[in-house]
Image: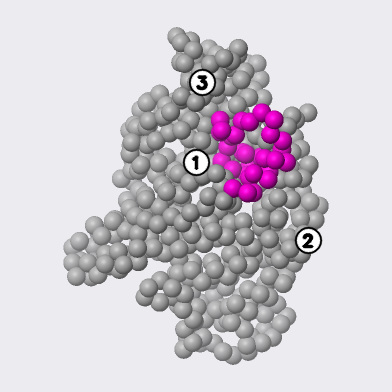
């Protein structure tokens, strides 16, 4: 039977990026922990580049073609390295763990790539700011961000020559799911979204001269609809609530979806006008969330794995680009989803090479071991030429060693009086209890030359176990 502390640990693993030493507080109840999780509001906007800087780089590219590659790489560095690292650090250190974890979910749900770092900032700010707000606001704002409009070709969506890409993905991937709309719905919605674009300063602009003002019939309703009208009709369809809740349940609870629970949650979600915070609070406060079948059954995504390690042991990278290398080597680079469908979860994260690399990673990082790993190849699906440049740029992050400074002070202090470092560390690091043979192997590979070395090596060995890949 799970103890209160077991449940709290499970909550931190699912609602955040793992259990940290600061999360251990004797006497705190599960209900108090849940309230604290929802009351933390340390969200801050992440800015690395201004629109003026982006435009200036573009102008230089026009005037000096020979310097184009250099300027593009500068833009990419701002985008992939700086913004990526800032957000990744927020996942590790922010008190608003649920806010950032929810934003990671929406990042895959509203999967988007942009070659413009300013557009990336806008997009990221929207999904982080509204991660726990109401879905309708998030949907309306995402549908008008330049990054998404560009990614899904809506700049080319004009009256008499509609481009259906944006309208199709809005329904298939963002709101209703397959089977809940028709090809006619796609065509009519595409007409409604004609003229949705952005101006030279990166702001949404409804271009009336490109919009089809004719009558459309969508989901059984007829009118002179624009894109906003289409989204309102979609939100009035209860299938939208069910589609979203099923996906959220799979991400936060269990990939084996309990349809009875999903139906109950989706009814509440729809009734609340798509209040995300209320939905998540219901999930984390429900007894079924803490059923044993829902604990330790999810394979950590690369971002969750890495962020969890660095919450466990505070770590600073001497070369920030090493973080990008690790993300790509493991198969999940923030701001660079594989396609518009986002990242696949679960077993999709694991293959023969990545599992071995995952288990070696703590030794590589904390014992300064050499690397023998090439980044995974990206398969560009849109903007092929630019993605090739991005891919080449990412290859520059190949490293033979990961140079870090890690702070073990708090962990060593916490375990110094422990009578059994192995057992206590196993409980602290792993979601599920380790068996006797596993703990015996950990002991055999630990360094007992001093109490400090025993604690450090035991923690690292625990993070190197297959069990650590689960949450």
Above or below, 358 relative to 275: above
How far apart in space, not on screen, are marks 2 and 1 (Cα)? 34 Å
The local crowd at label 2, few if under 14, some if 14 to 19, many if 20 or more residues have their Cα within 10 Å, is some
Circle 3 SS class? helix
Q: Where residue 413 is drawn, which disc sits there?
A: 3
Indicate the position of residue 445 as horizontal and vertical percent values: 50, 15
Of labels 2 and 1, the one closer to you: 1
Please report contact status of discs 3 and 2: CB closer than 8 Å, yes or no.
no
How far apart in space, not on screen, are marks 3 and 1 (Cα)? 21 Å
Of labels 3 and 2, the one closer to you: 3
Find the magenta span and give its range: 11-40
Query: Which residue matches tag 1?
Result: 92
Please report contact status of discs 2 and 1: CB closer than 8 Å, yes or no.
no
Q: Nearest the camera: 244 or 219?
A: 244
In the displayed structure image, the side of residue 439 where residue 64 appears, left or right: left
Of labels 3 and 1, the one closer to you: 3
Tell me the residue at 46%/25% (across/down).
Answer: 408
Q: How many marks?
A: 3
Above or below, 409 relative to 223: above
Q: Earlier in the sequence, mark 3 or mark 2?
A: 2
Q: In this rendering, does residue 435 appear at all?
A: yes
Q: Earlier in the sequence, mark 3 or mark 1?
A: 1
Circle 1 SS class? helix
Indicate the position of residue 454 as horizontal and vertical percent values: 49, 15
Query: Which residue matches tag 2?
Result: 267
């Amino acid at each position: 039977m799970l103890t209160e502390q077991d449940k709290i640990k499970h909550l931190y693993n699912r609602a955040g990026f793992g259990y940290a030493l600061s999360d251990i507080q004797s006497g705190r109840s599960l209900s108090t922990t849940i309230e604290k999780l929802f009351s933390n509001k340390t969200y801050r906007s992440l800015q690395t580049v201004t629109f003026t800087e982006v435009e200036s780089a573009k102008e230089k590219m026009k005037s000096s073609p020979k310097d184009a590659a250099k300027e593009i790489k500068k833009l990419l560095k701002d985008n992939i390295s700086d913004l990526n690292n800032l957000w990744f650090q927020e996942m590790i250190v922010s008190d608003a763990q649920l806010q950032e974890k929810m934003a990671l979910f929406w990042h895959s749900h509203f999967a988007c790539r942009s070659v413009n770092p300013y557009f990336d900032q806008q997009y990221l700010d929207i999904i982080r700011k509204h991660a726990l707000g109401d879905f309708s606001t998030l949907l309306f704002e995402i549908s008008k961000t330049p990054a998404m409009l560009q990614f899904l070709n809506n700049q080319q969506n004009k009256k008499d020559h509609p481009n259906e890409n944006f309208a199709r993905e809005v329904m298939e991937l963002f709101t209703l799911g397959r089977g809940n709309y028709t090809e006619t719905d796609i065509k009519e919605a595409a007409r409604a979204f004609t003229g949705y674009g952005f101006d030279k300063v990166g702001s949404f602009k409804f271009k009336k001269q490109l919009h089809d003002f004719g009558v459309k019939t969508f989901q059984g309703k007829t009118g002179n609809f624009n894109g906003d009208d289409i989204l309102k009709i979609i939100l009035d369809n209860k299938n939208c609530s069910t589609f979203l809740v099923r996906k959220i349940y799979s991400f936060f609870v269990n990939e084996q979806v309990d349809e009875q629970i999903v139906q109950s949650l989706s009814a509440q979600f729809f009734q609340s006008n798509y209040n995300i915070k209320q939905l998540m609070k219901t999930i984390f406060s429900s007894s079924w969330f803490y059923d044993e079948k829902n604990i330790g059954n999810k394979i950590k995504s690369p971002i969750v794995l890495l962020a969890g390690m660095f919450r466990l042991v505070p770590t600073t990278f001497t070369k920030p680009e090493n973080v990008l290398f690790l993300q790509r080597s493991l198969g999940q680079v923030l701001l660079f989803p594989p396609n518009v469908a986002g990242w696949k979860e679960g077993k999709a994260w694991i293959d023969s090479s990545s599992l071995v690399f995952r288990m070696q990673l703590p030794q590589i990082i904390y014992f300064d071991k050499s690397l023998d790993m090439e980044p995974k190849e990206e398969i560009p699906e849109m903007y092929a030429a630019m993605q090739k440049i991005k891919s080449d740029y990412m290859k520059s992050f190949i490293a033979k060693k990961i140079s870090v400074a890690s702070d073990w002070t708090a962990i060593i202090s916490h375990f110094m009086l422990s009578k059994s470092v192995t057992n206590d560390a196993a409980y602290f690091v792993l979601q599920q209890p380790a068996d006797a043979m596993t703990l015996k192997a950990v002991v055999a590979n630990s360094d007992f030359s001093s109490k400090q070395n025993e604690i450090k090596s035991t923690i690292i060995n625990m993070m190197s176990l297959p069990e650590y890949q689960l949450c």
